[in-house]
Amino acid sequence: MSTTAGYFDETILNDIRLRASEIAFDDRIKQQYVANYDVIKAVSAVQTAQVSTSASKNKDVDIEILWQNVCGQEVEDDTTCVIGGSKSSTNLEEYALTYEKKVGFSEDEADFIDNEYEIQSAIAKQFAVADKNITENFAQYAVSQIEGFSGWNVLTDGKGTVSGADTYIPASYWNASLAAYFSRVSIANQFTSPVFLSGSNLYEQMFVAEANAANANGKGDAILYGGMPMYFDLFNVDTVTDPDLKTFMLSMGSLAMAYRAWNPQSVEVVNGVFSRWQMKSAYLPFMYDVWYEPECTTNNLIQHNFKVRLMADVFLNPTSCDDNNTGVLSFVCGTP
């Protein structure tokens, strides 16, 4: 434990971490710090791959993902006594994490001499805002990744017009009956238990249908929408796909997320100079790396400097049975 004057020791730093966590769950205060990140919930819903820290000696490798697929099964005439057949494939893929972002912030004791707020509370709120901002930045990165993962829709005789990796559906078709078309698409493309990620597409229609579900003439729409597991991210999807309004269909097992944190899990003071530790995100299923360093400022008071970093990524299953069937489909409200 450091004894340097003005230096936050492990106990104080742990107290700040606790305060930041409490802010995230305080009903009155948290409204300033709530992150928009439903795209992450959608990816989590379809992730089946196993993720672990890489044991490789290659410094460019951060994590390992174990993907499993079943391809090559055939239905045949039973003309022999042979038992057995094709095997499932288990593929271990090594990845470098390409998303690396940080937030830096400082608080100076000199600013709190005549301030009714404590500096520890200010720092805790800085951590809460950093978590929110990084979460939303990563959520937008995730949308851009998903958009780039889009494959080809093999259903070409429905309401949509397939153009490259996008299927265009006129605005007049975006209603409850579209659920039937999406069902055909999922079957034709052999998607397993698909979920949907959308921005404003279908948001108002599904909102109204849910409210009308109790009415005799409103049950039908609610039932149709009920077969579409939908994640709406109004904040991130339309922002990234602008000017298009897009909805994505995600097959089970098509995507995975991973992160890597290098710092120790508990606060470690290094040579009395700086501290480092890991901090759990209130939103993402990840840990941040955090660094702290004091700096002498006005009248020998201390400025407390922090850095919060996230190393993470979103990956596409590279071992699907069909190179064109990525497990991700993109639908655009409009015409090509």
Image (cartoon, helix red, strand yellow):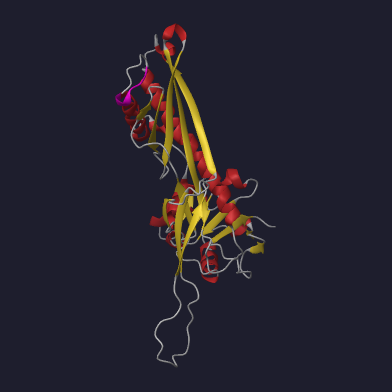
**What residue occupies the far bottom of the structure in this picture?**
79
Give how far across and how far down residue 189 sits, in percent: 55, 68
Name the residue rendered at 50%, 76% in the picture.
72
For the stretch drawn in magenta, what is the main secondary structure? loop
Is any atom of residue 208 visible in this view? no
In the image shown, does 188 or 255 lie closer to the viewer?
255
How many numbered marks appear?
0
Q: Is residue 192 left or right of residue 14?
A: right
Is any atom of residue 153 visible in this view? yes
Split into 4 quadrants, where in the image is the C terminus? bottom right
Give how far across and how far down residue 314 sits, in percent: 51, 50
Above or below, comparing residue 18 to residue 75 in the picture: above
Give how far across and how far down residue 17 sits, in percent: 35, 30
**What residue occupies the far top of the structure in this picture?**
299
**What residue occupies the far right of the structure in this picture?**
336
Give how far across and how far down residue 266 sits, in percent: 33, 34
For the record, the magenta segment spans 7-11
Quadrant of residue 259 within the rendered picture: top left
Split into 4 quadrants, where in the image is the N terminus? top left
Above or below, comparing residue 289 to residue 295 in the picture: below
**What residue occupies the far front of the structure in this picture?**
57
As for residue 295 lying within the magenta part, the answer is no
Above or below, comparing residue 228 to residue 82 in the picture: above
Quadrant of residue 19 within the rendered picture: top left
Name the residue rendered at 55%, 71% in the picture.
188
